Amino acid sequence: MEIKTENTPYSPSEPPKIHRLDESVVNRIAAGEVIQRPVSAVKELVENSLDAHSTSVNVVVKDGGLKLIQVSDDGHGIRLEDLPILCERHTTSKLTNYEDLQSIKSMGFRGEALASMTYVGHVTVTTITPGKLHDGVMEDEPKPCAAVKGTQIMVENLFYNMIARRKTFQNSSDDYSKIVDLLSRFAIHHINVSFSCRKHGASRADVHSVTTSSRLDSIKSVYGVSVALNLMKIEIPDSDPSSSVFEMDGLISNSNYVAKKTTMVLFINDRLVECTALKRAIEIVYAATLPKASKPFIYMSIVLPLEHVDVNVHPTKREVSLLNQEFIINMIQSAVESKLRNSNEARTFQEQTLDSSPSAPLSAKKDSIVNPSPSSHGSKSQKVPVNKMVRTDASDPAGRLHAYLQARPVDNLEGNSSLAAVRSSVRQRRNPKESADISSVQELVSDIDGNCHSGLLDIVRNCTYIGMADDVFALLQYNTHLYLANVVNLSKELMYQQVLRRFAHFNVIQLSDPAPLKVLIMLALKEEDLDPESNENEDLREKIAEMNTELLKDKAELLEEYFCIYIDSHGDLSRLPVILDQYTPDMDRIPEFVLSLGNDVDWEDEKNCFQTIAAAIGNFYAMHPPLLPSPSGDGLQFYRRKPEKNPDDKEKATDIDVEMEDELERELLSEAETAWAQREWSIQHVLFPSMRLFLKPPTSMATNGTFVQVASLEKLYKIFERC
């Protein structure tokens, strides 16, 4: 038997020897988890200042925090006898036993932050008496110096000994903006503390807040007047302390607030944290209630029993684990939805002048709602530019947007067609039935009622929505049966029936800019063309677009009077009907809809004309899957960023390169998540409640796969009864 010594080389089949890491290596690895970037160091230092009961916190940053981070406060300072162990790992004044975590109120508790900074930077502490620290150890004895009450901590040359980490921070302005954002969040919550943040050498502070008794005033000074003016208070009170789970108060943006990115400031028991699930839940409510282009501003402070919060789940303490988290999120989501629904009377809009130019271009950018202005930052090219330029209505509870616009004087109305529209509107109000009393429409409605399948009607009226099984089918429970229901077919039929039942009595969706029909039809024809780049096809497409545009201009009066589809004399589409309250169709499908109006409508026979127009509108308003692939499952691959690689740089590849390869197109992914979440919300909260009230399912749905029974409790019971 051969015995190998430690110096004897071993074969690859043998396991490698386990050895204890050097303490300096352990400390540096741990430091990289706690101090991930300069903003992490600032957060830890500011939280220490707050724990010291400071009333003033001042931050100075140089080169995004890599060269210098200086945090000064007027807190209670540090004892002289504590300085030698101040920056050793796991030394703290805030925790004694593990059980103390159940009642921890301070921001810090691990005793790792300052130690971590000394392992990846040079730290100087001035607290009445100063000391310099390196690798957790004080280099010199404390010496007396001139100082003010409180503590000043300087971190210099951050990540000087972590070359790969330091190289990732090429743009110092990015990290400085993160630090400014962090201080802004602290400032609007801790209104009894003044905060300032500035670049080293700069005379003006980028964040400057003073102590105030009003949180709204604090938000005004930090985020600006335009944000503060469009916020409304929201709260879930602690009405019964003996049985309550939590209380929440905050400020959320109303329907007049416009932003391209969600801002969510969340404090739980005065601790600044992130909660992705809560953020997504609130975004879904806003996406389903307000225009798609608008993202909310949210400030929330949640207070829970200390024992219901686990703060020890993340090295940076930015995440916490909550008891009853799902219940809390549902409660807050319901409160936000209720607040938005009840705040519609505060919604205001500016009147827009329709562009009379026949060649008014469509903007491919996401426009704002109140003051449309193109923004090149973060925009994505869309198949249908008009999809981000829509205003949705906001009463009943998603009501009529035009009611909020300032009406033009009659003298300013141009052309007989506009005047005729006003007269028609007046006649309708005097005698609403007059304009809709058309025998062909009554016949179509009678056909719907006479062709209704009684069995399916009972299912539709009494089913319970369970959830989406895939992109098209929803799961329904009816008595003891489980069904798959095709939501595209159901919504298409519901919209068709509603068009006929609401004939000539529609509310309106106003487009923020008129959309030229010719451009829309050309887009639709290109989508259908197998060879969209062919010059021959281009000429043919242009002729078809011109013909259809002229046709729809000729039929504009009929479309406006009976279907609330407004096309002006230049061939620009500017209004669409509201088929279901609280629901706006997918504007990516406008080109297909306009082409369908031109090609698929039988304009010769009255009954066929109304039926085909209603069918085209029903197909457009149906709840099709969004054009962007689903961000779950295999669809996530669509959003993977695939950077080009230079073969000569293989030797430079690091772990950071691998992370860059796997990085997702965040903005596009977020847009897709919002679109899919909004669709599912609309299916549950708009489609199915409306189906129960209005849908008369035709007999064809019993055989065309719209409803498929997938389980029966009675049959399952019999199967298991035999076992």
Image (cartoon, grey):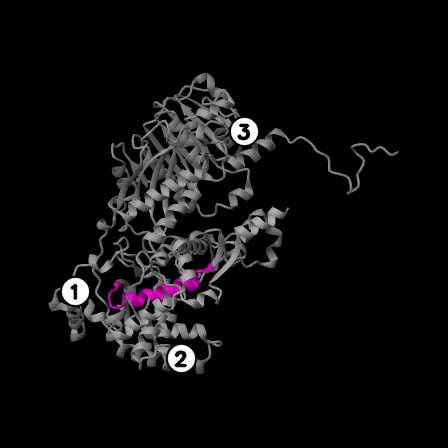
Check whether the beta carbons of the residues at disc 3 and disc 1 lie within 8 A of each other: no
Tell me the kind of residue under disc 2: Arg
Within 10 Å of the Cα at label 2, are there few (<14), some (14-19), or many (20+) other Cα atoms?
many
Within 10 Å of the Cα at label 3, are there few (<14), some (14-19), or many (20+) other Cα atoms?
many
- Foreground: 718 or 296? 718
Q: Nearer the viewer, mark 2 or mark 3?
A: 2
In magenta, the rendered stretch is 485-507
Q: Residue at x 28, y 75 (%)?
A: 440
**Sooner in the amino-acid sequence: mark 2 or mark 3:** 3
**Sooner in the amino-acid sequence: mark 3 or mark 1:** 3
- SS at circle 2: helix
Q: Main secondary structure of the magenta part?
A: helix
Within 10 Å of the Cα at label 1, are there few (<14), some (14-19), or many (20+) other Cα atoms?
few
Instruction: Measure how far apart labels 2 and 1 are at the Cα level.
Output: 42 Å
Q: Quadrant of residue 128?
A: top left
- Foreground: 564 or 384? 564
Name the residue tied to disc 3: 135
* Numbered label attached to residue 429: 1
Check whether the beta carbons of the residues at disc 2 and disc 1 lie within 8 A of each other: no
* Residue 139 in magenta stretch: no
* Residue 503 in magenta stretch: yes
Tell me the kind of residue under disc 3: Asp
Quadrant in which the N terminus appears: top right
Q: Return the residue found at the far right.
A: 1
Tell me the kind of residue under disc 1: Arg
Instruction: Measure how far apart labels 2 and 3 are at the Cα level.
Output: 72 Å
* Numbered label attached to residue 541: 2
